[in-house]
Amino acid sequence: MSSRTVISGGLVITASDEIHADVLIEDGRIAALAVPGTQNWTADRTIDATGKYVIPGGVDAHTHMELPFGGTFASDTFETGTRAAAWGGTTTIVDFAVQSVGHSLREGLDAWHAKAEGNCAIDYGFHMIVSDVNQETLKEMDLLVEEGVTSFKQFMAYPGVFYSDDGQILRAMQRSAENGGLIMMHAENGIAIDVLVEQALARGETDPRYHGEVRKALLEAEATHRAIKLAQVAGAPLYVVHVSAMEAVAELARARDEGLNVFGETCPQYLFLSTDNLAEPDFEGSKYVCSTPLRPKEHQAKLWQGLRTNDLQVVSTDHCPFCFVGQKELGRGDFSKIPNGLPGVENRMDLLHQGVVDGHISRRRWIEIACATPARMFGMYPKKGTIAPGADADVVIYDPHAVQIVSAETHHMNVDYSAYEGKRLTGRVETVLSRGELVITEREYTGHAGHGAYTPRSTCQYLN
């Protein structure tokens, strides 16, 4: 059964172009673009996008569905999380499979395939969290790269859980230098942070705001610097996740100025929220506990600047939701027991569009940091991340003039609060296609679990 869809009259925005064009979709792929009204295309379905943007579906390269953390689990399943992603104009996620200490990478990857398969509303891929570097793990990394899991995350934080020491990091980086994989780094000095946590609690400093005070920006910058130097020694590329501090941005900028293959990601929470949120009274601040932590407001301008100068290349969400009731509350009386993570997979595209409205970035840069660059960074371009003949028909009809108020009452993430409650945003997703199938139709969910397909990836497309 062949199917054809025409999207007519919209402004097509990609990372490189803005053109008024009609878009022809055939059998789940973009078939052609044409000057509006010049083609007599016949179609099973025509979508009028007059006055709207036609943009590639978002690629969120950093999510944690069903992640076990701190004695509980992230509250979004692959079903609820990918449905919420679609509502927010994201059509591909790359989630993190977890290797547990004492177990193989394969066991972790198989476990995540089992969670996701048949449950996703949109397409998905996996990174691999490497928690236990040994000779067997290093061999497995080669095999995973061959089968399309081409990125590996390591943690300089969370001693006793995910933590890798410098020697383990160096070994994994050396391996990725050989097999073409990309090391993703959570850059915080976890050993030093644990000392500061212990000291703060001993002083009776137990409220959520102290989470931000002990996870110091200097310790993010120090770890970022150290990760860069280890990657340089190994001759490996490096991707630093969830950069939150201006001091860490400076380390990335310096490395890139030296010509190193070093990349940086930030997240909407660091662009729009701050330590003011962590300090909200009555334990409300716990809603904003994530790592790296929120920073004082003056960091926001430096992060936006980094996105404009390309010292930061990607905005992902680090979506890792925990309900306030029963989950965040585990840390009452001890901030170190608050599960780390924020909900955001549904809000990213809209928040970044607000960045366009506010004059921080251009429309094309919006698409670049949210769609095209993450697709290239993780080996999915041009299948994902653009609107061009041959690309998957992952397309969003976006109303740039609609006004919305963000609220937990209306969002679709499986969590009992919104990190952006009450925020007024200009711009909203209207219709979403995933591989040519309607997932959101004029603000109504028409997708289904199981439509989303696992997407093997090639290696990072920014490397020679």
Image (cartoon, helix red, strand yellow):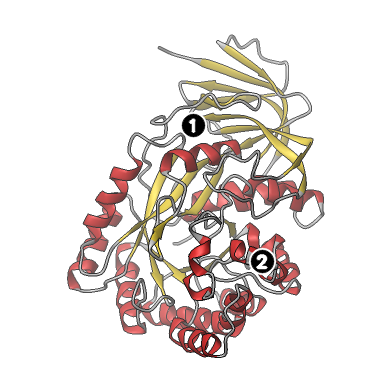
Q: Amino acid at mark 2?
A: Asp
In the structure shown, which secondary structural element does the residue marked by tag 1 occupy?
A: loop
**Label 1 neighbour load within 10 Å: few <14, some 14-19, many 20+:** some
Q: Is residue 7 above or below residue 156?
A: above
> Does residue 23 appear to the left or right of 382 in the view shown?
right
Q: Amino acid at mark 1?
A: Gly
Work out whether residue 341 or residue 382 is closer to the camera in this orientation and state it. Answer: 341
Question: Between marks 2 and 1, how big is the CA–CA gap?
Answer: 53 Å
**Label 2 neighbour load within 10 Å: few <14, some 14-19, many 20+:** few
Work out whether residue 33 or residue 362 is closer to the camera in this orientation and state it. Answer: 362
Residue 382 seen:
no
Work out whether residue 104 or residue 175 is closer to the camera in this orientation and state it. Answer: 104
> Does residue 327 appear to the left or right of 66 in the view shown?
right
Q: Could you say which quadrant of the image residue 413 lies in? A: top right
Residue 456 percent coordinates (x, y) = 35, 45
The residue lying at 34 percent from left, 79 percent from top is 170
**Given this view, does label 2 or label 1 mark the residue nearer the observer?**
2
Q: Is residue 345 above or below residue 441?
A: below
- Give the total of numbered labels: 2
Residue 444 percent coordinates (x, y) = 61, 25
Residue 54 percent coordinates (x, y) = 67, 32
The residue lying at 57 percent from left, 18 percent from top is 5
Q: Could you say which quadrant of the image residue 39 lies in? A: top right
Q: Label 2, on which residue? A: 282
Report the quarter where the C terminus lies.
bottom left
Q: Is residue 156 above or below residue 361?
A: below
Residue 134 percent coordinates (x, y) = 21, 74
Q: Label 1, on which residue? A: 390
In the structure shown, which secondary structural element does the residue marked by tag 2 occupy?
A: loop
Residue 318 seen:
yes
Report the quarter where the N terminus lies.
top left
The residue lying at 51 percent from left, 69 percent from top is 331
